[in-house]
Image (cartoon, grey):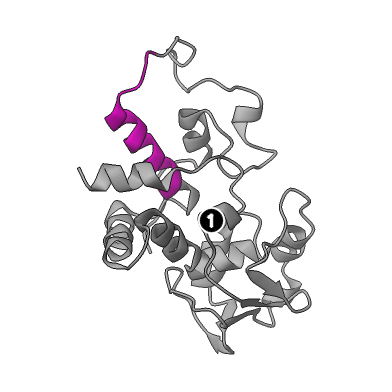
Amino acid sequence: MSKRKSAKHKLDRRMGENIWGRPSSPVNRRSYGPGQHGQRRKGKMSDFGLQLRAKQKLKGYYGDVTEKQFKATYAEAARMKGDTGQNLIGLLERRLDMVVYRAKFAPTIFAARQIVSHGHIRVNGVKCNIASRRIAAGDVISLGDKAKEMALIIEAQSLPERDIPDYVSADGTDKITFTRVPKLDEVPYPVTMEPNLVVEFYSR
């Protein structure tokens, strides 16, 4: 697993959007970009700029996965039948760390990745510490015994800012079933994601 080298909220400032919908985001106070020139009026962005921005926003939302990993996911989505943008979202939503986040076992995607890597998550009853593991429909994700008492997880489950989506079926507070791969319009993004622009970026 690669280590994130910059503060996660820098992405919010750069994009001018509250990417994860968190109350602590600095965009809630300062909607302009970071740095001494952040408040300057911006000119019209080029097509390439729009595509790059869409890619950075989507990649950042999923825990700032590495470019190599994200590009490999796109390549797999392109090989699959159907719409490449929808396929890309489906593959990203099937990552174990994202399923843990959707289940409200963690307050942020970064915390979800840490919980997985520290061995607190079970997949079909077996401990798994690989955040990028691909979850299939019908897989059961549960918390380990120690994790059930962790303050971070108890706090996450009480957060009012997001709900568990329809494609994740809760069984009590410590177990969920990933029922199906979602479509783009079913994924509860706090901001608009444009996977079609990501496809254009990589297919140039």
Q: What stretch is highlighted in magenta?
A: 43-59
Q: Which of 183 and 110 is in front in this view?
A: 183
Q: Position of residue 148 (x, y in %)?
A: 73, 75
Q: Name the residue under label 1.
A: 110
Residue at horizontal 65%, vertical 81%?
144
Q: Quadrant of residue 169?
A: bottom right
Circle 1 SS class = helix
Residue 77 visible in the current orientation = yes
The quadrant in which residue 173 appears is bottom right
Q: Which amino acid does label 1 sit on?
A: Phe
Q: As displayed, is residue 51 above or below residue 102?
A: above
Is 61 left or right of 55, judged from the image as shown? right
- Please, is residue 43 above or below residue 185 in the view? above
**Residue 114 seen from this side:** no
Residue 45 among magenta residues = yes
Residue drawn at (59%, 36%), measured in percent from left and top? Answer: 18
Q: What secondary structure characterizes most of the magenta part? A: helix
Q: In this view, does 134 lie to the left or right of 125?
A: left
Residue furthest to the bottom:
125
On-image quarter of the C terminus = top left
Image spot of residue 145 (x, y percent): 69, 83
| Count of all numbered marks drawn on residues in the image | 1
